[in-house]
Amino acid sequence: YILEQDGKTGVNLPELYVACGTADFLYRQNQNFLQKAQSLDIPVMYEEEDGAGHEWSFWDTYIQHVLDWLPLKNSSLKG
């Protein structure tokens, strides 16, 4: 709903990042969100990992992906 409303008002949304494991109980919701965003031409960087669940080991890995993806320059957040 929010994506549709922002699109109607001309809000320029930033590219979004979504990552999910295929064994995560939220996988289907993430797929639905991705499809909706794509149908509205909202840019989404999407990654998934086969067999990964809703767990710390997935998040530990993908937080580094997010930091690498973000346009951070000269930041102490990036190693």
Image: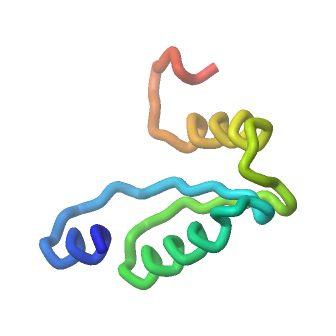
Q: Quadrant of residue 41?
A: bottom left
Q: Quadrant of the C terminus?
A: top right
Q: Is residue 46 left or right of residue 56?
A: left
Q: Quadrant of the N terminus?
A: bottom left
> Where does residue 38 sit, x and y in percent of width and height?
46, 78
Total tally of numbered discs in the picture: 0
Q: Residue furthest top?
A: 76
Does residue 52 sit above or below 71 in this rendering?
below
Q: Is residue 71 left or right of residue 51?
A: left
Q: Residue furthest left?
A: 9
Q: Residue furthest front?
A: 25
Point 53% across, 72% down: residue: 34
Colouring: rainbow
Q: Is residue 76 left or right of residue 4?
A: right
Q: Residue furthest bottom?
A: 39
Of 41 and 26, which appears nearest the observer?
A: 26
Point 63% across, 37% down: residue: 63
Does residue 35 sit above or below 22 in this rendering?
below
Of 75 and 8, which appears nearest the observer?
A: 8
Point 51% across, 15% down: residue: 76
> Where does residue 33 sit, x and y in percent of width and height?
50, 72
> Where does residue 75 sit, x and y in percent of width and height?
47, 20
> Where does residue 25 sit, x and y in percent of width and height?
70, 62
Q: Is residue 5 left or right of residue 49?
A: left
